Amino acid sequence: MKAILLIAAMILGTGAQAFAQETVELNHVTTREEARPAWVCGLAFEGESQGLQFIIGSFRTVAYGELNCTDGLGGEYHRPVRVSMGTKFISPAIGIGTFRLAGVSAEISLFNLHPDVLLGQYVVAQGQVAFVGGVAAFTAVKVQPPQIAAQVSIQLLSGFGAHLGFHKMTIEALN
């Protein structure tokens, strides 16, 4: 699956950035580098979800893991991250319960110089269901022109409850 995503990203991204150069600030150092056509990333994480929400209320997920990325030119990137998802007090979501979760996600990022741009806020559609054990999935999108990132995740749950809704997800670097 990762190879298919990498090939698709390379095809889509190469035409737009074949020899582009970009000036960026990474870790407080400004550099001028050749732009990469695409990054394909995987994120393995463990965490917890809990809450009570029927349009009004709160439902939160916090997980920790490592973001691992590769590009078609041999570049690699590894970074520990915190993933947090949550709804506002009034939000298009319903849910009740507490879950422990372990999951993986695949992310494809186009028109980015470096995977650090994957950190930040995403719009998420998520569903979780567990009665002792269960499954969950979410799809997330981040668009900050000219950069585009999409993420798909599947998780295994332990706990009791159900949650379905739209909200925001934040991926933060831990160091």
Image (spheres, rainbow, N blue to C red):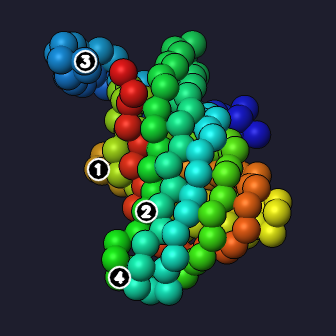
Q: Which residue is mark 2?
A: 86
Residue 2 in the image: above or below residue 90: above
The disc, 1 or 3, on the residue closer to the chain's N-terminal end is 3
Helix, strand or loop under label 4 = strand
Q: Is residue 146 left or right of residue 135?
A: left
Q: Mark 3 and mark 1 in contact (Cβ < 8 Å)? A: no
Query: Crowding near pointer 1: few (<14 within 10 Å), some, many (20+)?
Result: few
Q: Find the distance from the CA under tag 2 to the CA under tag 4.
A: 11 Å
The disc, 3 or 2, on the residue closer to the chain's N-terminal end is 3
Q: Find the distance from the CA under tag 1 to the CA under tag 3.
A: 21 Å
Q: Nearer the viewer, residue 112 or 59?
A: 59
Q: Amino acid at mark 1?
A: Pro
Q: Amino acid at mark 4?
A: Ile
At 39% from the left and 27% from the top, the residue drawn is: 174
Q: Find the distance from the CA under tag 2 to the CA under tag 1.
A: 24 Å
Q: Amino acid at mark 2?
A: Gly
Query: Crowding near pointer 2: few (<14 within 10 Å), some, many (20+)?
Result: many
Q: Is residue 12 visible?
A: no
The disc, 2 or 1, on the residue closer to the chain's N-terminal end is 2
Residue 58 in the image: above or below residue 122: below
Query: Crowding near pointer 3: few (<14 within 10 Å), some, many (20+)?
Result: few
Q: Nearer the viewer, residue 60 or 79?
A: 60
At 45% from the left and 50% from the top, the residue drawn is: 84
Q: Mark 4 and mark 2 in contact (Cβ < 8 Å)? A: no
Which quarter of the image is occupied by the N terminus?
top right
Helix, strand or loop under label 2 = strand
- In which image quadrant can residue 120 be found? top left
Q: Which residue is mark 4?
A: 90
Helix, strand or loop under label 3 = loop
Q: Which residue is mark 1?
A: 145
Q: Which residue is mark 3?
A: 27
